[in-house]
Amino acid sequence: MNARNVQEELRFHRLMAKLSEYVIEGKRDPKEVSEVLEKLQMIKDDPNFAKKLGGEVGKLLTSKGEGQYPLTINYTRTLKEMIVSGNYGHINPDITADNFPVKGDGKVEVVAELMHLNRVVKSDEAIAEFKKRGLRPAKIEVLLALGEKYPDIQREFPIVALASVWQDGDGDRCVPSLWHDSVRWILDLYWFGGVWRRRSRFLGVRDPA
């Protein structure tokens, strides 16, 4: 086996490991993954296998923008400790415990969900859609738990927590958002009363049955 084949083999196993992780976490449909693996098995001797591998598996690894994410909200930590655990390269200085008080006890298990409306929307429209889906908008502590446990998600799109709202000195309501500028992870504030771009994802939590 030459060096190129070894590299392709290693790449294949890395991709498979990531796919397995996604299936276990409930982010990908096991049947869909199985169908792609069967297809790859049929073309494994193709000279362009490496290119096709990247294309097929890449489709599965690229987030579809929605999904469920099990999280543990640790209320024994302060807001500052939650933020530090996310390793953000930029933090809006107005994101403080005074402006965004966190209330809770102990450790709470939740399943957060990302909602993608695939259109330009206002905050109130997103909140109304949450209600239709049996969800409620997430607070900042859920957003920070997501950013800590699943940091790569915010490389793909901005993620917004609409339930934590702070009014600044000008009377503008602001909400926290996570995103990545290709260099660093960012925790910032955005105007609640504005419009959200098509690529934005809204973080929600489903109430217990």
Image (cartoon, rainbow, N blue to C red):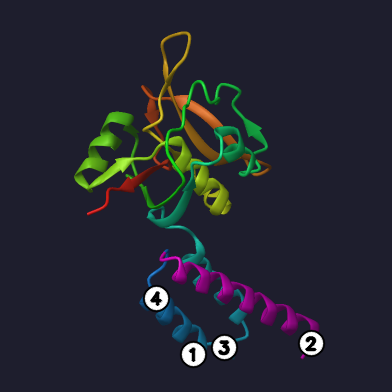
Stretch of the chain drawn in magenta: 1-26
Mark 3 belongs to which amino acid?
Answer: Lys
Question: What separation in Å lies between label 2 and label 3 (alpha carbons)?
Answer: 16 Å
Q: Earlier in the sequence, mark 2 or mark 4?
A: 2
Residue drawn at x 74%, y 83% as measured from the top left: 6
Question: What separation in Å lies between label 2 and label 4 (alpha carbons)?
Answer: 33 Å
Mark 1 belongs to which amino acid?
Answer: Met
Quick one: quadrant of the N terminus?
bottom right
Q: Residues within 10 Å of mark 1 (few under 14, many from 20)?
A: few
Task: Tell me the residue that label 4 is attached to.
Answer: 30
Residue drawn at x 52%, y 87% as measured from the top left: 43
Tell me whether circle 1 and circle 3 mark residues in contact (CB < 8 Å).
Answer: yes
Question: What separation in Å lies between label 1 and label 3 (alpha carbons)?
Answer: 6 Å
Could you say whether the residue bearing mark 4 is in a helix, strand or loop?
helix
Q: Earlier in the sequence, mark 4 or mark 3?
A: 4
Rendered position, 110 above or below 95: below
Q: Residues within 10 Å of mark 3 (few under 14, many from 20)?
A: few
Task: Tell me the residue that label 2 is attached to.
Answer: 2
Question: What separation in Å lies between label 4 and label 3 (alpha carbons)?
Answer: 21 Å
On the image, which quarter does residue 67 sit in?
A: bottom left
Task: Tell me the residue that label 3 is attached to.
Answer: 44
Q: Position of 80 compared to 167: left or right?
A: right
Task: Tell me the mark number nearer the camera, choosing from 4 and 3.
Answer: 4
Rendered position, 51 above or below 26: below
Could you say whether the residue bearing mark 3 is in a helix, strand or loop?
loop
- Classified by dominant secondary structure, the portion drawn in magenta counts as helix
Q: Position of residue 31 (x, y in %)?
A: 36, 78
Q: Position of 66 compared to 22: left or right?
A: left
Rendered position, 9 above or below 100: below
Mark 4 belongs to which amino acid?
Answer: Pro
Q: Earlier in the sequence, mark 2 or mark 1?
A: 2
Task: Tell me the mark number nearer the camera, choosing from 2 and 4.
Answer: 4
